[in-house]
Image (tube, rainbow, N blue to C red):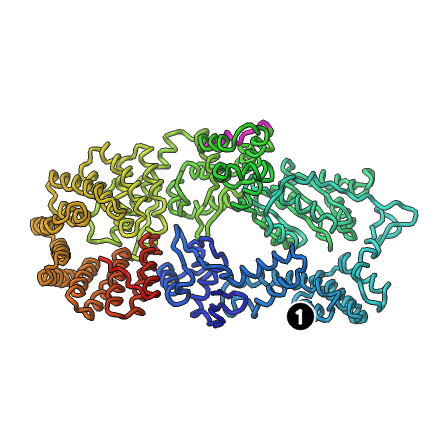
Amino acid sequence: MMIRLLGPVELERADQTRPVRPPQAALALAALAWEVGRVVPAETLEARIWGERVPPGARNTLYTIITRLRREVLGDEGRVLRRVGGYQLDVAEPGVDLRRFRSLAEVAATAADPRPPLEEALALWRGDPLTGLPGEWTERVRRRLWEERKEVVLRWARTVSAEDPGAAVAALSPLAEAYPLDELVAVALIEALHEGGRTAEALARYAGVRRTLAEELGVEPGAALRDLHHLLLRTGGTGRTTGTRRQAAPEPRPGPPGGDAPGGTAPGVDAPPVPAQLPARLAGFVGRKAELERLAGSAAVCVISGPPGVGKSSLALHWAHHHRDRFPGGQLHAHLGALDPADASAVLSRFLGALGVPETRIPPGVEDRTGLYRSLLATRRVLVVLDDVRAAEQVTPLLATAPGCLTVITSRTELPALSVTVGASLLHLDVLSADEAHGLLAARVGADRLAAEPEAAELIVDRCGRLPLALAIVAARTVRRSDLPLAEIAAGLDRAGTDLEPFADTDPAIDLRTVFGRSYRELPEEAARLFRRLGGQAGPHLALAAVASLAGLPVERTRGLVDQLDRANLVELSARGRPRLHDLLRAYAAEQARAADRPATRRAATRRLLDHYLHSACAASAACYPHREHIAPARPARGVTVERFTAPEEALRWYAAESVALPALVAEAARAGLDRHAWQLAWGFGEFMQRRGPWEEILGVQEVALECAERLGDLLAQAGCHSRLARAHAKLGDDQLAVAHFEQAVELHRDLGEPVLEAHLHLGLAVPVSRVRPGEELRHALRALELFEAGGDAIGQARALNNAGWWRAQRREYDQAYADCSRAQRILADLGYAQGEGHAWDSVAYVLDAMGDHVRAVACYERAAELLLACDDPHPAAETLVRLGDTHAAAGDPAKALNAWRRALECYDTLGDAQAESVRARCAALRHGEHPPRGR
């Protein structure tokens, strides 16, 4: 199977290609395939499908689209996996034509004959990428892909030009029409024309390009084009530029200031000096292939920004050294970190001196120095590297924007003003990929040493957070202590935890605290305070309302502060505006919080954050589960923003986005001594997580919550924690522990005189008891019925009746089972309790199937699945669909069986439930003509 993006979005199977429809499904598949193998956050998918105006209910629509992709588009040959916070496309190689295109382009770079892989790569193109799909994201993708294709066409043309110049001309001519200002394309086409003996056309093409550059940009052709033009004039119509370009006349040098020959060196005057100011190249530089390519194709000014320690200067200098031959006029370099943003005069003076201007001829004012500097660069090709820039006004006089020049800027902020004023390219640098981080360590420490201790190397990379400076610091120490095994170094980092001491050094240039501190100290006080607050939270990325609560500020004011932190590259914003801190920056922020803020201040911030989550979770529970018993937490602290929900769908989206934070929040509450918050938070998220898992996470949360409830002496809270622990243990197959926790909860509720709550426990207890002490399960269902009757709970009575019928069916007492389950279904329908009705329909279907009435059983299973999915209860819905598939298979209808099991797989994959594998085994067995075992 091949997903095609290089043209209309299509799916190719066995030489048959069909389009992906409708457009939203095509956009979703394209958005996932663009990052195949990586998790794409749900909010990113929404932004790519709907742009800035994401409609209400988009998350539900997205789920429907993903379901359609799984069921109708990919089938068994690809999977869209649900992961924490997003979705991941998993397809076998080659999988996506774009991935194949890029892979072939990489192969060609090292191949003895690059033509075959380049030709195969170009053959994958079938038109405009993502043809016809709307949106800003698709436009950005198209522009990037056409640029990538242009580079591949240029590479191919250069390989064939000498042997088949006609083919090169045919490929380059439409490229030249599409990119009339691209001098590299023009050079390649003019060379190919000349190689084919069409020198007159080549000269005409040069004249046309020169005219276009003058009219559109007001500039003359660059040195490469001018050199080629001179070569054509010398060789005339003889053809064959290949191998002779090196003998072209050198680029004219400008004369000294006030000289007699503005277009070249005046007679009798020495050529001006060629500055070479680049600092030494960094040894052991690895990775950053995509960023290096972007630098190569950037505008006349490129700003490299990113968090402190991410390797901005290393990238700039590595690229500059590698490409310095492109700038025969020289290279200028200045470090501006300590320079006043308003004073570029000193740097201008130094640059002018390097360009050959005597000190006595350097004008006194900044404007005059700037004018002279630009005049000197007008006829040279010079590379200017400006390091650690703090503000745009700091570099405006220093920019080399003349044709053929390039200014590379590194900055801890993005400097968006330069994008507006001079059209600068903005290149944001993130931490290294896992492979690049290992490569950096291997380059510094030695590949053999890493290969000997792979687990220790993995721990070092993880503890350094793939931050290049942190990795370099640890690598340097590792080299100095060659007697120590990597495992001991890794263990030292692990013991340090969130302490930054392993990254400290007496040299401030490589001391992580000092490097981070330069960015932190430039923050306004209110933004610095928010940075410290964020560092004090060990949980995952917080939504804006949670951040506002943490700060004790209104949401809009908080948004402005988060933007300041983002511009300073101390946080990274997700597509939904959630600030994310690198682990080492978080550790630094926590250190600053301990140093600058009183314990009471930090505790109050933690309390506000927990209040936000607790009260928002209670509001979500009321919206989603109105039949649930509710708790009444204390009033939220002042400054807390509480989420409000007008529909269950909104609350479910909130739960889905925020439940990942629960383990850290409950642990934080326990550490802070806020025991009531801890167990109430576990309660607030409890119902949502019980329906989805992950069960191991539920165990961890509820165990902490139980300890807190025991410290408080709150018996009712303890009983609730035991109940949720029991259900999680049962889901994980640990029935002995499940029964023990259920029985503890039953005893507590009995002592508290809570018959209805005790009844609920008997219903849950019946399932693990049936496996631990078979024969007791029906007694628990009937005891629950008695207790619900005593408490006057009509819904509970119907649920207990349905459970009793289910357990009678296990005893093959089908007539009574059918009577109990059917009666329960009618009662629950009359009471409007759809979730319970769905469970009852499932029981009725099971009994009918056991009695041999497969037709009615199928209809009842379908109704059960419909109700359970509508109530957002995917786990029992999946179990129902598995049984529906079993019924179809037993009735000899494999197509319908496979369809039902695929629907069950969608639920299990969304939940990340391991039972998905048993369903896949059913599907595989049926396709091979085997009879899979029936579920229960």
Q: Residue at x 75, y 39 (%)?
A: 350
Q: Is residue 219 left or right of residue 64?
A: right
Q: Residue at x 26, y 37 (%)?
A: 676
Hey, which quadrant is residue 90 in on the image?
bottom left
Residue 75, relative to residue 251: is it above or below?
below
Q: Residues within 10 Å of mark 1 (few under 14, many from 20)?
A: few
Asked if residue 514 shows in the view, the reply is: yes
Where does the image place residue 486, in percent across and percent down from the top left?
51, 33
Regarding mark 1 in the picture, which secondary structure is present there?
Answer: helix
Count of numbered circles in the view: 1
The quadrant of the rendering that contains the C terminus is bottom left
Q: Which residues are magenta?
A: 498-506
| 594 or 551: nearer the viewer | 594
Where does the image place residue 615, in percent across and percent down from the top left?
29, 45
Q: Is residue 295 magenta?
A: no
| 499 or 725: nearer the viewer | 725
Q: Predominant secondary structure in magenta?
A: loop
Q: Residue at x 62, y 53 (%)?
A: 294
